[in-house]
Image (spheres, rainbow, N blue to C red):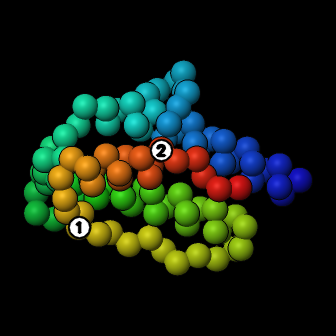
Amino acid sequence: MVDALVQVLIAHFDSVFAGPNGDYPAVLEALAGISASQALWRPAPQQNSIWQIVDHLSASKIWQIDMLEKGQADSPVWIQPAGGENEWQAALTRLGEPMPG
């Protein structure tokens, strides 16, 4: 039963990020057309950029799987991303990759 539950949760997580999802846009759909410079913009110094949120979501996916499979995991940390369009596109690709499981 645990394996079946894990598989259902993984499928749900994947649909939240990449779709399909009929109730609301998937995260990657909402990010379509956002440039690297837009993704790095911060509304205030103490607030996170879109890119930081994307990187944190990617790290959180790994955390969730580790918690389900091992019962423990290192907490994801907030990082300050840097780079241009290639690095931003790579961050989006990581977010859209199916979760292991």
On screen, 57 above or below 79? above
Q: Nearer the viewer, mark 2 or mark 1?
A: 2
Give the secondary structure at mark 2.
helix
Q: Position of residue 100 (x, y in %)?
A: 65, 56
On screen, 97 above or below 30? below
Q: How crowded is mark 2: few (under 14 residues within 10 Å), some or many (20 or more)?
A: some
Give the residue at mark 1.
80
> Residue visible at 83% across and 55% down?
3
> Residue visible at 54% across and 27% down?
21
Q: What residue type is labelled 2?
A: Gly
94 vs 83, left or right, is: right
Give the secondary structure at mark 1.
loop
Q: Which residue lies furthest to the right in this view?
A: 1
Mark drawn on residue 24:
none
Q: Mark 2 vs mark 1: which is more N-terminal?
A: 1
Q: Residue furthest front?
A: 86
On screen, 77 above or below 25? below
Mark drawn on residue 96:
2
Q: Residues within 10 Å of mark 1 (few under 14, many from 20)?
A: few
Q: In which quarter of the image is residue 56?
A: bottom left
Q: Where is residue 73 in the image (x, y as percent from the top left)?
A: 58, 76
The C terminus sits in image quarter = bottom right
Task: Give 96 or 68, whichever is nearer the viewer.
Answer: 96
Q: Position of residue 31 (x, y in %)?
A: 32, 36
Task: Give 21 or 37, whichever is nearer the viewer.
Answer: 37
Q: Quadrant of residue 78?
A: bottom left
55 vs 18, left or right, is: left
Task: Give 45 or 61, whichever is nearer the viewer.
Answer: 61
Q: What residue type is labelled 1?
A: Gln
Q: Where is residue 22 in the image (x, y as percent from the top left)?
A: 54, 21
> Residue visible at 37% across and 46% down?
92
Give the CA separation, mark 2 to mark 1: 20 Å
